Amino acid sequence: MQGLKQPPWLKKRICLDEGFGFTRSVLREFALNTVCQSARCPNIFDCFSRKRATFLILGGTCTRGCAFCCVKKGLPGPVDTDEPGRVASAASMLGLDHAVITSVTRDDLADGGSLQFARTVDAVRKRCKAGTAVEVLVPDFGGSKKNITNVVRSGPDILGHNVETVPRLYKKTRPRSHYRRSLDLLKSAKEMKADLITKSAVMLGLGETDEEIIYVMRDLRDAGCDDFVMGQYLRPSLEQAGVTSFVGPEKFLELKKIALSLGFRRVQSGPFARSSYS
Amino acid sequence: MVEVKLPPLSEDTTMATITLWHYTEGDTVRRDDDLVEFVTDKATFNLPSPATGRVKKVLFNEGETVSVGDTIALIE
């Protein structure tokens, strides 16, 4: 399966309770994708049973080819104009107090999908109860400041953009992405709106060193990034990159302490930590 | 008789390998006790028992690969 034997701390409990069933039925009713399902996230049982999900907008086909991701790659279809309303309806029906919206990368669109993000944030704000937090986890929009502005102006509470790994591994795992472009996106978002909480995440176990992770932490702090997440890379299938190492809970804790000492507001660090998991 | 089935784990994960039965034939198990552990490409999962009763039959052994929807045990 993974190549390396899975360590004992990488165990999840399946929970198929009413909450799980309800969440799945709501997503089906509104014909919505989630990254939970598309990326085979092992937290799905935990999240769905608590009626939490991360909506995946702009279709289920991505225009990038990151080596660690099992989301379908290719040429996507047209933007679904009804999608923002359906996301809002689902979020409302689930009673979400924190809605997370992410997407595939849409290099085929002039706006990179940023206007769909903005429409979705707006729809969720209007449909959900007052005080619902809205978090977006965005692609790099090809580095376009205009596109990131579209999202920032829609007023999310948290803007996340994951650097995913260390610069040295970009060529191997993210050949069509650019590390500096990702940092610039986070920095620009913060400059546009100082009280916007920004967030990024990396996966451990792709061959990075501790020093490289700390280097990334410093870069993110220089970009004004508030929150940071470190989780274990888990190979979704044999078609994705292999796991180089399984990082133990003690190491995650050690790195968390370093991250907090560098000034991050909030750090999630653990084998199953994910940008959109809480 | 309650059939214990391998549930759908994700959109396109169709198989898993059983690594550990926490209970064997003849054991009494309570609803929600961890019954069986299995591994997929992504992680190791524990499946809780859907019922309280006696494990009448284990249909797949440790090390065997099962498909989503397969009945893997019977509880009476």
Image (cartoon, coloured by chain):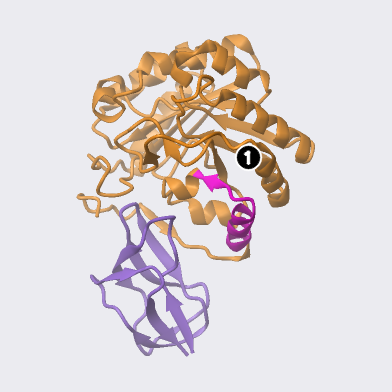
Chain colours: A orange, B purple
Determine which quarter of the picture holds residue A12: bottom left
Determine whether, in the image, residue A51 is placed left or right of residue A132.
left
Residue A196 visible somewhere in the drawing: no
Q: Which residue is mark 1?
A: A83
What amino acid type should be assigned to the residue bearing mark 1? Glu
Q: Position of residue B65 (x, y in %)?
A: 27, 69
- Span highlighted in magenta in the image: A19-34
Quarter of the image with the N terminus of chain A is bottom left
- Chief secondary structure of the magenta portion: helix
**Viewer-closest of A275 and A64:** A64
Which element type, helix, strand or loop, lies under badge 1?
A: helix
Determine whether, in the image, residue A189 is placed left or right of residue A162.
right
Determine whether, in the image, residue A28 is placed left or right of residue A90.
left
Looking at the picture, does residue A137 appear above or below residue B58? Answer: above
Q: Position of residue A155 (x, y in %)?
A: 68, 23
Q: Position of residue A173 (x, y in %)?
A: 28, 30
Residue A174 visible somewhere in the drawing: yes
**Viewer-closest of A242 and A58:** A58
Which residue is pictured at 50% across the width and 17% down the height? A186
- Residue farthest along the left direction in this orientation: A3
- Residue farthest along the top direction in this orientation: A191
Determine which quarter of the picture holds residue A194: top right
Q: Residues within 10 Å of mark 1 (few under 14, many from 20)?
A: many
Determine whether, in the image, residue A26 is placed left or right of residue A148.
right
Q: Position of residue B46 (x, y in %)?
A: 41, 65
Which residue is pictured at 43% across the width and 39% down the height? A61
Number of numbered discs: 1
**Viewer-closest of A168 and B9:** B9
